[in-house]
Image: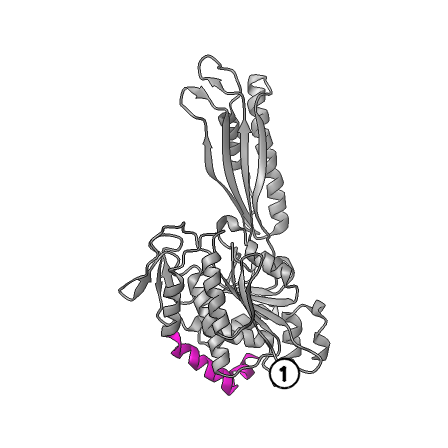
Amino acid sequence: MMQAILANKRVQAGLAFIEADHERTISEQKEIVLIEAPTFHEEKRARDYARRLRELGLRDVHIDEHGNALGRRPGRGQGSWQGPVILLEAHLDTVFPFGTDVKPVEREGKIYAPGICDDTRGLAANLCVIRALDYAGIETVGDIVFAGTTREEGMGGLAGMRGLLLSHPEIAASVSIDGAGVDSIVYQATGIRNFAVTYMGPGGHAYGAFGLPSPVHAAARAVALLSDLRPPILPKTTFTVSLIEGGHQIHAIAEQASFKINMRSDDGAELDKFEAEAIAAFEQGAALENARWGRKAVTVTYEKILDAPAGTQPRDAAIVQLAWQATEALGITPRLEAGGCTNTNIPVSMGIPAVTLGRGGKEGGIHSLGEWFDPTGTYRCPQKSFLLLIALAGLAGAKPSCEAMAAAVPVATGVLSEW
């Protein structure tokens, strides 16, 4: 299928355009990075991205109720079948707070700026894809939705992507641009659950009230229990207590102590199992501390503060194979990533075929003030997206393989019988 696409003269023209458009794309990347967009505060960057989508001629450009900026490139359809709707997205938010110096500095062939890679590069690369489709006069069978999504990072919990897909059930397959490298293909979804755990007690003087159960001790007992848990190596399941605090002075029994725990697994069932074991440890920490002093004085509460779903799809799923072929077509040896938490988590958990492709090029210092990006040869990132979108949405006037499309697009759409 990919060979037939590559043989098309318009496709060849689009690939050549992307390479020629490289400097413009890098220039846009440096413009977008100047617009600060901490998670939960992506409004200004979303408005800018919507403007760029509108200027490129997309239809129905808007910012939705979830803060996502999106627009649609209509397909031509064939006969009674209008083709699948395919999503290409990158996330708008960065991990840096307002006031961070994000001005790009170029040095020794690299561009330094917080957020220059993650995921500003993805946003700019996807704009290049739109220009290439238009320049080459390529018409797809199905519609393509281009989006900048919100709340991908940290405590955002992939909420922008979740909202977009719930609001657009017509989307049949999703391609995200995120992560390092030009060869990577993320096709699995590592689930994440974060809990905030709080212990409360009466507190008192360290000497005069000695014998009262301590929230700090209860939290410490719970952490010790957690540290002895043994999650499976496969499917990979991990955890860490990452933040802990409590008390107000050295000469007092604390009235409060708390910690946060991050749990991850490539398998949803294992994540459920580990969550249950962790909750038992939370509660046992308080019970052991109360039992030690013979008083039921310490209580524990816990709240799930982030839940990113886990999921998987087979390595031989058509969308994975098409991403592999698109990568190989550019002379790159593809690499399937084992696990990974990206916006692909959401569609995969919903049964929608999806992959996340690397941004291309070399990069480093991700999520640090020293984040840098080497733009050399990074035009192959939008070239790869360009080929995969055409394969998924269908090239108008050229029938794609029935088997490939049937596997790549959910049969539930009820549109594949025409093929």
Q: Position of residue 352 (x, y in %)?
A: 63, 63
Q: Quadrant of the N terminus?
A: bottom right
Q: Quadrant of the C terminus?
A: bottom right
Figure label count: 1
Q: Position of residue 265 (x, y in %)?
A: 56, 50
Q: Is residue 202 above or below residue 57?
A: above
Q: Which stretch appears magenta? A: 1-22
Q: Position of residue 39 (x, y in %)?
A: 47, 52
What residue is at 36 percent from the left and 50 percent from the top? 99
Please name the residue that numbered disc 1 is placed on. Answer: 399
Residue 283 appears left or right of 369: right
Residue 178 appears left or right of 303: left
Query: Which amino acid, mark 1?
Result: Lys
What residue is at 43 percent from the left and 80 percent from the top? 17
Q: Is residue 19 above or below residue 151?
A: below
Location of residue 225 (image quadrant):
top right
- Secondary structure of the residue carrying numbered label 1: loop
Specify the farthest residue to the left: 108
Chief secondary structure of the magenta portion: helix
Q: Position of residue 330 (x, y in %)?
A: 45, 76
> How is colour applied across the structure in the image?
one colour
Specify the farthest residue to the bottom: 9
Residue 310 appears left or right of 366: right
- The answer to which of 162 and 352 lies nearer the viewer is 162
Classify mark 1: residues with Cα within 10 Å, few (<14), some (14-19) or many (20+): few
What residue is at 51 percent from the left and 15 percent from the top? 211
Can residue 335 be seen by looking at this rendering? no
Residue 261 on the magenta segment: no
